[in-house]
Image (cartoon, helix red, strand yellow):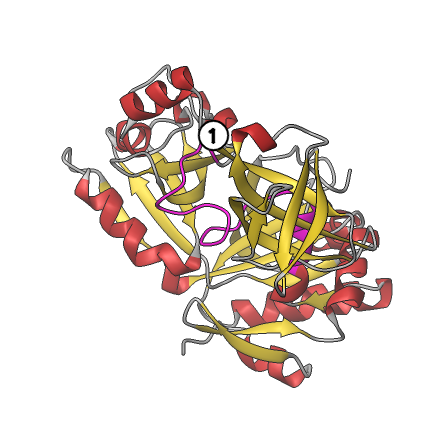
Amino acid sequence: MKNTPFTEKHKALGAKMAEFAGYDMPISYTGINDEHAAVRNNAGLFDVSHMGEFILKGDNALELIQRVTTNDASKLTSGKAQYSCMPNESGGIVDDIIVYCIEENKTYMIVVNASNTDKDWNWISRFNTNNVEMHNISEKTCLLAIQGPNATKILQPLTPIDIINLKYYTFEKGTFAGVENVLVSATGYTGSGGVEIYFEDKDDNADKIWNAIFEIGKPQGLKPIGLGARDTLRLEMGYCLYGNDIDDTTTPLEGGLAWITKFTKNFTAKEILERQKAEGVSRKLIGFEMIDKGISRHGYEIDDENGNKIGEVTSGTQSPSLGKAIGLGYVSKDYSAIGSIIYIKVREKNLQAKVVKLPFVR
């Protein structure tokens, strides 16, 4: 297993560790519910240094990004970021990504899921026919996500960047905790606000930034957060997890990502997705709340009132914020309307659930 620059710090803090995407990662420290509440109500820090980062440079960098992604990256100006996805040739999703515009029409950073780093690199490289300069900086890049309603207020004394007023999906580069060339981005996958900080793993940058954050943050209740709470937080917001809710067999239109699928440009599988949009999808990703007592899990069958299979659960948990069981899953479009009653097969029993509007937590 690989380590991040913070692995020993997690262990020293007593984190429960497990393999994730080939890395030894913290699952929880004080418990998922406690960590979840810390982020929703105050602030928490996630080590997400396992994520992949690519730099694309040159006169044809934007053209390459436009060709391999569904969203319209030409709308990006320097200092702005964009959620997007890369479709494969049959319209399925290679990965969901964030595109950062470092220098308009010249330099971009693409952040990819950890488990897909090699796959994504090979996929983009396959379409790089116009000599775009590509650099895989994943191994030397640290990424910490400090999330929660008080995150920016806690961190502001560590940087001259005005992070309190940093607009959603924008970023700035500057000094953070005495470290230069840190990219501070108003992004994250919790729905509770905050920032993500990218910096190079060299000298003692990792120690310097980690220690500075906890020195200023611990007295204000900032806590380290594991991947367990990261999952419950993103699920409450209805955010997709690659490999669970979206993958190479699900299209953006099926997965609720039509809003990042722009047909005003050419991209891989555009014609397939245009046809799917015109004809309508046969299945849709929906959010549901359990009515009967029980918790759904990935892979559980979804049935209609007569016990006929109509879909499958992709993510499920007990929501710490709501105190009820929630989930995501694909169902036949006839059962996708808000308020539809569906049945989740839990231990061979069909438990009633209701399709609800996303996000679960507002």
Frontmost residue, 83 versus 308? 308
Frontmost residue, 304 versus 41? 304
Residue 107 horizontal/vertical position (percent): 35, 36
Is residue 300 positioned above or below 97 on the image?
below
For the magenta stretch, what is the residue range? 230-254
Frontmost residue, 15 versus 49? 15
Residue 291 horizontal/vertical position (percent): 78, 48
* Neighbourhood count class around disc 1 (C-alpha, 10 Å): few under 14, some 14–19, many 20 upward: some
Q: Quadrant of residue 221?
A: bottom right
Residue at the image position 61 percent from the left and 63 percent from the top:
348
Secondary element at tag 1:
loop
**Left or right: where does residue 30 sit relative to residue 166?**
right
Q: Which amino acid does label 1 sit on?
A: Ser
Q: Does the magenta stretch include residue 181?
A: no
Furthest-front residue in view? 306
Residue 134 horizontal/vertical position (percent): 25, 46
Residue at the image position 61 percent from the left and 83 percent from the top:
11
**Left or right: where does residue 213 sit relative to residue 334?**
right
**Left or right: where does residue 72 sit relative to residue 91?**
right
